[in-house]
Image: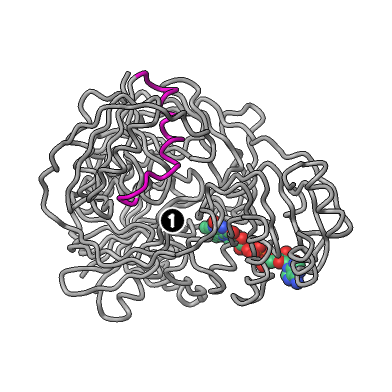
Amino acid sequence: MKSLIIAEHNNEHLAPVTASVVKAAALCADEIVVLVAGKNCGEVAEQAARLAPVSKVLLCDDDQYQYALAEPLASLVIANAEGFSHILAAATTSGKNFMPRVAAMLDVEQISDIISVESPDTFKRPIYAGNAIATVQSSESVKVVTVRGTAFDACESGGSAAIESIAAAPGEAISAFVGEELAKSDRPELTAAGVVISGGRGMQNGDNFDLIYKVADKLGAAVGASRAAVDEGFVPNDMQVGQTGKIVAPELYIAVGISGQIQHLAGMKESKYIVAINKDEEAPIFQVADYGLVADLFDVLPELAEAL
Amino acid sequence: MKILVPVKRVIDYNVKVRVKADETDVDLANVKMDINPFCDIAVEEAVRLKEQGVATEVVVVSIGDAKAEEQIRRAMAIGADRGILVQVEKPASSLTVAKILKAIFDEEQPGLVMMGKQAIDTDNNQTGQMLAALTGLAQGTFASKVEMADDKVNVTREVDGGLQTVSLKLPAIVTTDLRLNEPRYVKLPDIMKAKRKPLDKKVPADFGVEERSGVSVLKVEAPATRKAGIKVASVTELLDKLKNEAKVLS
Ligand SMILES: Cc1cc2nc3c(=O)[nH]c(=O)nc-3n(C[C@H](O)[C@H](O)[C@H](O)COP(=O)(O)OP(=O)(O)OC[C@H]3O[C@@H](n4cnc5c(N)ncnc54)[C@H](O)[C@@H]3O)c2cc1C
């Protein structure tokens, strides 16, 4: 069995989640090929080649792949899919975008967001915002799978796979990149951080998030938010944790002024330790918290920043 | 321009679902059902485009059991003009749904398909992208802003790093994210009016689509529960626990 993994990257760096996808793929197949498609992304191919389980890297360097638009990327995957038993990518907004397109082009079902590989055709995945875990078996000729990064460790590095350049796939351009607004932050990336501190509606406004940032910087933590905090415009959308935001599983998750609705819990309840700071002792977040502090966050956050 | 809006009947998002004792599925008996929140947003967006004079007709389609008519009527109360209910025996897979939608797309020839990015039951996040593949059209997924521009649509997408804007050739498939709009409150007179709007009832065979799935569910179990934690009385106690008990801080 042979797995094709589509690397996630920004044309310079391979995203760490790809190493987790490789780990999942290694449980499905003995031969692992990584496809790196982008523009001036040779360095990314080198990084992928160093992942120990990888036997070959396919590099497609072409303008049309610069922003990983779903239409050209799916066509490229299809052009190179022959002979693979599994096609995998991370269940990030990028993987979620192009992978179902790949699956439908192959006339197979996709299995989304797996959290374990039971056997090469059987996987576990959360459904209903993580309130149930389904074990599903695929009888499709090719298993098209997206992988929840936080559920798998990174694979070992230290390999030196061969890099082979491949041609771009032909196709009419029906979509075009117009622009992007990417959040710039010196803090760790949310899905990869060891400590995450998130604020909710209880923060009241965007300026008050400074109280969170101060604690975050003391802890070297990433900062997240509930949907309410994003909807209210306190912070940008890329900080949302939950069923429809990012999934995080740090060593320590600190929820501040967040009530703990199921959609939020879906994004953080696999964290090793959960701390909740909320003035309402009935808040559902306390049901999943290892350590709960019933108090006003405007007292607690400055005290925390001071004490750390 | 005609807009096609597929909608799904799902469990109400406020309900915490339970797993059946025999672990074959979740228990949906006597559970409150509603329109999938992302589909609601798609209906609202399509109706707004009609109100702005950009769209001329909004056609809503649901693939589900007979009760999915309720969700079609709700979409009509928001302002959709007519509906198509494709009745299936068992919940249809994403690919099956996409194939039925492709057949309806070919018949209806809409200029835009507006649909939810994910259903909150299966959490698959697949159907829109699959429909785009089957129709060979461009896709704008996870939209937080949609702007029509002649023969194109500009879609601002919520992505992990922030926001990305793409321009898609029409017709195109757009899937909605939460911040695209806030669906209106449905008023009683509109609910009454919706009851008289035309609704076509179909089955997958009418479109030559076979209900198959290459994926079977072996088991559905409850997630591991977290053991109950403790309340701490102060920041000092909290830090002490994190350092000396959990050992996550040094
Ligand atoms: C389809 C769908 C998808 C969704 N996806 C997500 C998702 O991905 N992520 C997500 O987070 N939500 C999501 N939601 C929304 C979710 O249902 C909740 O509405 C949201 O999580 C609530 O955010 P919150 O806890 O910040 O706000 P609230 O529920 O309003 O809670 C605020 C909390 O702050 C506390 N508080 C207020 N002031 C203080 C103070 N001074 N000190 C201490 N505590 C204080 C209050 O006691 C309260 O518990 C989704 C909803 C839907 C319908």
Badge 1: how crowded within 10 Å, few (<14), some, or many (20+)?
Answer: many
* Residue B13 percent coordinates (x, y): 57, 55
Give the residue displayed 41% in from the left and 61% down from the top.
Answer: B158
User: Left or right of B211: which side holds A239?
Assistant: right
Return the residue nearer the eye: A191 or A233: A191
* Residue A172 versus residue A237 in the image, above or below: above
- Determine the image quadrant of residue B248: top right
Return the residue nearer the eye: A168 or A61: A61
* Residue B126 percent coordinates (x, y): 37, 46
Single out the residue that lies furthest toward the bottom: B52
Single out the residue that lies furthest toward the right: B233
Which stretch appears magenta?
A10-30
Give the residue displayed 22% in from the left and 54% down from the top.
Answer: B105
Q: Quadrant of ligand 1?
A: bottom right
Q: Secondary structure at mark 1?
A: loop
Return the residue nearer the eye: A55 or A289: A55
Q: Quadrant of the C terminus of chain A?
A: bottom right
Inspect the magenta stretch and tell me whether residue A54 lies in it. no
* Residue A238 versus residue A170 in the image, above or below: below
- Determine the image quadrant of residue A298: bottom right
* Residue B49 versus residue B167 in the image, above or below: below
- Determine the image quadrant of residue B114: bottom left
* Residue A170 percent coordinates (x, y): 10, 45
Amino acid found under the numbered disc labelled 1 = Asp
Residue at the spot of label 1: B160
* Residue B215 percent coordinates (x, y): 40, 29
Give the residue displayed 45% in from the left and 42% down from the top.
Answer: A16
Q: Quadrant of the N terminus of chain A?
A: top left
The chain letter under disc 1 is B
